[in-house]
Structure formats: structure tokens, C-alpha cells
Image (cartoon, rainbow, N blue to C red):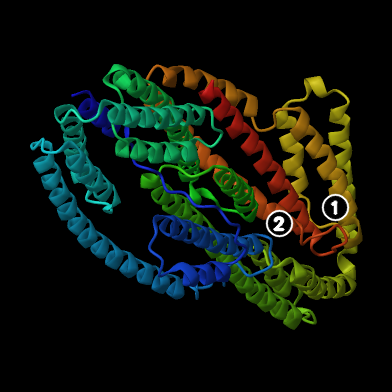
Amino acid sequence: MAEEKETMQQEEMELPVENTTEKKIYTNRQEILDRLAEIVNTTTDEVRDEINYLKLVYYKLRQQEVDAEMKKLLEGESDVADFESKPDDLEPRLKELLNIQKEARAAMVEARNQEMAGNLEKKREILKQMIAIAQDAGEVGQQYNAFIELQKQFKEVGAVDPKEVNDLWKQYNTLNEQFYDALKINKELRDYDFKKNLERKTELCEEAEKLGEAADVVQAFRRLQDLHEEWKGLGPVSPAVREEIWARFKAASTVVNKRHQDHFEKIKEQEAANEAGKIAICEKFEAIDINAIQTAKEWEEQTKIVLGFQEEWRKLGFANKKVNAQLFDRFRALCDAFFGAKANFFKGQREEQNANIEKKTALCEKAEALKESTEWRKTTDILVNLQKEWKNIGPVPHKVSSALWERFRGACDAFFEAKEKAQGGEKAEEKANLELKQAIVEKLKALKENLQSVEPQQVRDLMAEWNQVGHVPFKEKDKLYAAYKEVVDFFFENIDMKGQKARLNNFRERVKNIATEGKAVVQSERQKLQRQLERLQNDLKTYENNLGFLNAKSKSGNGMLALMERKKEDLKKEIEELKAKIDMLDE
């Protein structure tokens, strides 16, 4: 029958209603626990949705506290090595309240299931009585009133298992049609019922059509479900308009359902975009090789990148529920690993620097024990070795480095000044050596005048001659060496003293041969050069740090300063040559 078809179409259109609750803003977790305590024994769907929301906000506020602790850590307000996230002392109360709610809902569900089972039996009993009336014409007036009373009782009985609803309403509507069509009751009475039902169904159609333009899509969908429930409870209309009125209601319902579906499709699309964004952040994070970070500067640079990842993560909304927690755990594990490794690095640096303090303090004590010695040759050799040992010791904290160096240099200077006064007989020889070295400097300066014709070997010969000349007067050696270094540096900067150009040309030819052997060979060669480059760059940083402890005012330390300056410049040239070779491979 048409009314039966109408009921089945109504049921096919129904979708699960999404429960929502008004979102209140909470600023701390205790407020959330207080609210949970108020509603924990309430078992409505609205309260269930609110509890889910309170749980989500609780853990979000907890995460903000952890992030704040981490921010203080990164801003230097707490010690990285001693950082440990505070335990959540409110979480046990949260879980206790959630368990209470879970038990209350379980009891409610059991009671509701029993109630629905009882309601099902009542409705079935009413349908049996309606069947008896529909199959027995009897006296029209008496049968009509009894049937109307049964209709009322059927509608007043509470909810039943959703799986039984369709069959019950199908039987109910079929019996209604059989009763009105078979008994041939008073036409005016039936027409009056038809008219009343048509008027109400028309109103339902109008309201459903307005819902198609409502701003709140979810609320409109929920209201549509109420309209469908009322529609099912209304009696039939005239057969002439029965299909037409149902088609109108169905069309309006389709619009609301389509908007509801589109709404959640958009949410799914946004969640998918958020998921892709979070995966991309994790992949970029995972590409960072923590083991390759070797210096404090590199750690700070990588920390800025990681903080950028965290800021980018915060801007993204939730991903799909199935993966959102997994993605967060993945990202959090990366953050923990990174900052844990950083803390260990700086802890190791402090331990190494403290060990260096002990080593340099020991050297100071040895130098101080020798500063009044008159065994000039033996003590000179010992102090020179101590200076070399000092140079090879790594850095110490900046706050003590200057004091340690001044102490060490003072002891050395005291000995060498005493030695100079005691060895007045050697001044003539040192004066002669001074004139020889001054002559070598002048020869080097003369070569500068005709740079185009200068061969590297000419410069190297004069440098060898310089090295063969003995000591010069102590007060003159720094000034003389500065002049010598200046002119030698000029040649190293302006001509190919070490054959660098030739080596690069030879390497360029070698690259051509390597390229024919395939990408794997090229990549292997590049990795080898890259490792050499990193080693030299670390050596350069060590020399630069050590040079920070020396200065031009030093007397006995100036020879060591000059050697270190020369080594630093040599390292820079080697680094540039390696970079040039790597560029050739990349091309």
C-alpha cells in the first residue's frame, strides 16, 4: 500500500544524529573536574558528549602546561639536564570520575534495554487487538472509538529496540489503512481525519523546507529527525494526495540530509589535510640526523628549526580520530629524543670543560714551580712543551679562561724575562740573527714589486732560510715576526704557494673519469670529501677557540700565537680547496 511505502521511505532517509553540546571555555583542569563531579551521575546523551568534550579539554590544558615547562627550558629559565615533566596529580581524580560515569551509563543502558523489551511486548499486544478490530467490521461507532483508543495507547508506549521500529510501524500503518478502508466508516469523519492529517503534514513539509536554509546544519538535521518521528505517528491522508505530500516531504528532507552530509565531508577533508600536514612535519623532523650535530651552535640552529615544527604543529587542527593520537605520539617522541640528546650534549660539554680546567690548572702549577729555575736550557724545553700541551687542551668555560691563561702566561713570562737578563752574553749573536732575518724580510718585500715573475719556490727558499736563523733579541722578535708574517701571508694569498690550482685542475680531470663510472662512485667520492671537510672545520674551530685565549700582548706566548695563526690560515685554504672539489662533483 502507499502508506506502507511511505513509512519504508521515511526509515531509509534516517541517519544517526550527532550529539553536540555547548562548548564552554575552561581555563584550568580543576574547573573541569568540578564540572565532571556535578554531572558524572547523569546519563543523557548530551551529558555524555559534554564529558567527552571535558576530557579532551583536560588533556589539552595538561599539554599546554607541559609545553610551558618546555618553553621555560628552551628560554634558559631552567636547567636542561635536570628537566623532568611534573606528574599529573589531578589525573587519578579524572579517571575516577570517568569510571563513575561509565558505570552509571552501563546501568542506564541495562535499564533502558529492559524498558524497551517491555515496551515491545506492550506494542505487540496493542497490535494484536488492532488486528482483531480490523478483521471484524462490527458496529461502526463502537469499533471506531476502540481503534482510536488503541492508536493512542500505541503512540504513548515508550521507545523500543531500533531494530524493531520499522516492523512495528509497518504493521501499525497497514492496520490503520485496513481499518479505514475495510470498515467503511462515516465518510465525513474519515474525510475530517484526512484533512487534519494533511494540514499537519503540510506544516511539517513547510518546516522541513525552511530547515534546508538554516545556518546551523547539524541542528537542522537533528530537527528533521524530530519531524520524521512526528510524521510516522500521523494518520493517513486522502489517497489522492498521499504520494504527492510524501514526495514533498521527502524532497525537503533530501536537501537537509545532503547539506548535513556535505558538512561532514568538509570536516573529513580538513582532517585529511591536517593529517597530511602533521605527517609532513614528522617526516621533516625525522630527516634531522641528531648524531651529526656536533657543536653548540649547530644545536641552537637545529633547535630553532624544531621550535618552528612545534609552532607549525599547533596551527594545525585535529586529524582523523583513528590517527590523531598516533601522530601526536610520533611527534612527541621525536621532540623527546631531540631535546634529550641536546641535554646530554651540553652535559657532556660541561664535563669536558671541567676536565680541561683541571688539566690547565695543573699546567699552571707546573709552570709556576719552574718560573724561578736557573736551568735555562732544560727549563726552556719543559716550558715550551707545556705551552704545546696547553694548546692541545680543549676549551674551558669563558668565565675562567682568561684568568687561567693569565696565570699560565705570567709564570712563563717570569722565567723567560729572568733568562734574558741572565744571558746577556748571547745578545751579540741574537743581534746578528736579527740583521739576517731583517734582510730576509727585505728580500721578500723586494719580490712583491715584481709579483708576476715570482715563483713559489723563491718564497719557500727564503722561508727555509728564515727558519735556519737562530734566536733574535726577545724584545724584537714579535715585531720582526709580524713583518715576516705579513709579507709571507701576501704571497700565500696572491700566488699558488701550495700548488692548489694545479691540484684542482688535476681533480677536475679526475671528476670527468669518475662521472663515467656511475652515480654510486661519484656519491662515494663526495662522502669521503665531506668527511674530510667536517674534520677540518672542527679542527679550525678548535684553533679559533684556542686563539681566543692568546693575545698580542703576550711575550713568551707570541711564538705559539704565530704558529697557531699560520695553522689556522692553512686550514682555511684546505677547507676552501675541499669545498671547490665538492662543488665540482655536484656539478
Three-letter amino acid code at the position of disc 1: Asn
Q: Nearer the viewer, residue 414 or 131?
A: 131
Which disc, if any, is residue 268?
A: none
Q: Is residue 274 visible?
A: no
- Quarter of the image with the N terminus in it: top left
Gap between marks 1 and 2 measured at Cα: 33 Å
- The answer to whether 62 is drawn above or below residue 299 in the figure is below
- Residue 455: x, y in percent? 73, 26
Q: Position of residue 565 (x, y in %)?
A: 75, 49
Residue drawn at x 85%, y 23% is 450
Answer whether labels 1 and 2 touch (C-beta < 8 Å).
Answer: no
Q: Residue at x 60, y 51 (%)?
A: 303
* Residue bearing mark 2: 545
**Which of the pair 406/11 is nearer the observer?**
11
Between residues 162 and 67, which one lies in front from this camera angle?
Answer: 162
Residue 433 shows which numbered tag?
1
